[in-house]
Image (cartoon, helix red, strand yellow):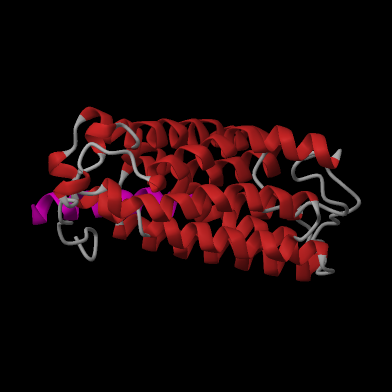
Amino acid sequence: MEDTVSSPVPLASGHDAGKITPEQLAAVFLAIGQVVSPALVTSLSGRQIGDTPGLEPLTTPAGYAFIIWSPIVLGSLAFAVYQALPAQTDRSFYPVIRRPAIVVFTGFTLWLVAAVLDQLAWTVLIFVAMHLALWRILPVILSEKDRWSPADRYLAALPFSLYLGWTTIAIFANLASALTYYGLTPAGTIGLLWQTAILVAATVHGVFGVRRTAGDLPYSGTLLWALTGIVAKNLTAPASPDFPPVAGAAPARIIAAVAAVAAGVLVGVTVFARRTARTLQ
């Protein structure tokens, strides 16, 4: 299981056991911020999140796919409340993942602000920072898998697996939106080529993530959710003069096919990674 887990993390020092720390409270506050910030940012700006002028790239998933934010945000809040309980203060991995979690929760709100201000380059950079912080979290949690309680499984492992999986694809979706906004056309042969390259890059990054997490099902499932959202959007999209045919084929259908192949690749890699992990146990 190559680089799948970190070495066991030490227990927190005993003199603070049972005391709620400022970091625990910060995690709760910022997790609440994730819940309220979409409505707050929308209300103050008078704009909907993602309401960016110009054409929408074909690599953006269908609208229904973004419902994944609900379990991510609510799961993050559940984690934040649970880790703040006095009994969790001296747990082995909660102190280790708390600071990166604070970075992630802060990044979410900053990303919303950057999006409504049309600072799309910043949305990409913020998502990269969030993604890197999530990679500081999930491997640590997975390294403690043998000692998980049911609460650890559903209040820590699950929300951060979903979060990491979604940002794996969202980095590239935000990059495509930024490139389009700053003048790179998503239409024609050039548009088809660079959006295909974006999908290939997202798939390669996803393969790396699946292998590193040993085929963690919530992580892999979130990748597939995003990719099938791209397939669904482009298979059902009506013909548009904004996206004329390329080599006689509708660009939306080509992107749908590429995303479908990517999903198939990730399914295969997930199965292989899980079998390999079981063999090495």
Image: 158 above or below 119: above
- In the rendered image, residue 273 lying in the magenta stretch gets the answer yes
Residue 177 can be seen in this image: yes
Judge from the rendering whether residue 233 lies leftward or rightward of residue 205; answer left or right: right
Q: Where residue 4 appears, x then y in whole percent?
A: 24, 59
* Relative horizontal placement of residue 81, taking residue 182 as reference (left or right): left
Where, by quadrant of the figure, is residue 174 drawn? bottom right
Residue 221 appearing in the image: no
Percent position of residue 82, x then y? 34, 32
Secondary structure mainly formed by the magenta segment: helix
Instruction: Give percent across and percent down for residue 236.
Output: 72, 36
Residue positioned 58% across, 33% down in the render: 35
Q: Does the magenta stretch include residue 126?
A: no
Q: Compare residues 188 and 160 and report the one nearer the observer.
A: 160
Q: For the point 65% across and 52% down, which residue is it? A: 111
Rendering quarter of residue 25? top left
Magenta residues, start to end: 262-281
- Does residue 49 appear to the left or right of 152 in the view shown? right
Compared across the picture, whether 247 is left or right of 61 comes to right
